[in-house]
Amino acid sequence: MADQLTWEDAEEIGILLAEKFPDQNPLEVRFTDLHERVTQLPTFADDPKRSTEGKLEAIQMAWYEEYQDAQAG
């Protein structure tokens, strides 16, 4: 896992969010709230203004994959 995460690190961010919010269904999180959660991660080091809907969607889907795995497990 990267030391400093950016908006391009959707998979790693998804894993961290799944660990931090294990009971939260990512599909129920608004993009504004997702943006806030990502930028508050201790290892997130990118410019908050560089996010896009596509990047947030990629993070949400990575988080959702982790969430589904945990629910099935």
Image: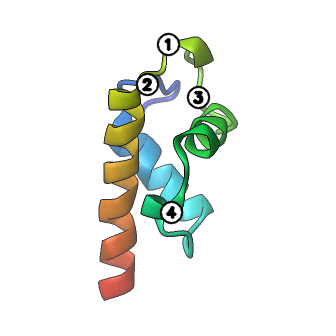
User: Which residue in the structure is indicated by mark 2?
Assistant: 7
Drawn side of residue 10 relative to residue 19, left or right: left
- Amino acid marked by disc 3: Phe
Between 15 and 26, the one lying in front of the other is 26
Quadrant position of the N terminus in the picture: top left
Mark 4 vs mark 1: give the one in front: 4
User: Which residue in the structure is indicated by mark 4?
Assistant: 28
Within-10-Å neighbours for mark 1: few <14, some 14–19, many 20+:
few
State the CA–CA distance, disc 2 to disc 3.
8 Å
Query: Residue at left 42%, top 35%?
Result: 56
- Closer to the chain start, of discs 4 and 2, is 2
Between 50 and 6, the one lying in front of the other is 50
List x then y, in percent, for residue 19: 54, 62
Give the secondary structure at mark 3: loop
- Amino acid marked by disc 4: Glu
State the CA–CA distance, disc 4 to disc 2.
20 Å
Query: Residue at left 52%, top 24%?
Result: 4
Quadrant position of the C terminus in the picture: bottom left
Q: Is residue 20 above or below residue 61?
A: below
User: Which residue in the structure is indicated by mark 1?
Assistant: 50
User: Which residue in the structure is indicated by mark 3?
Assistant: 44
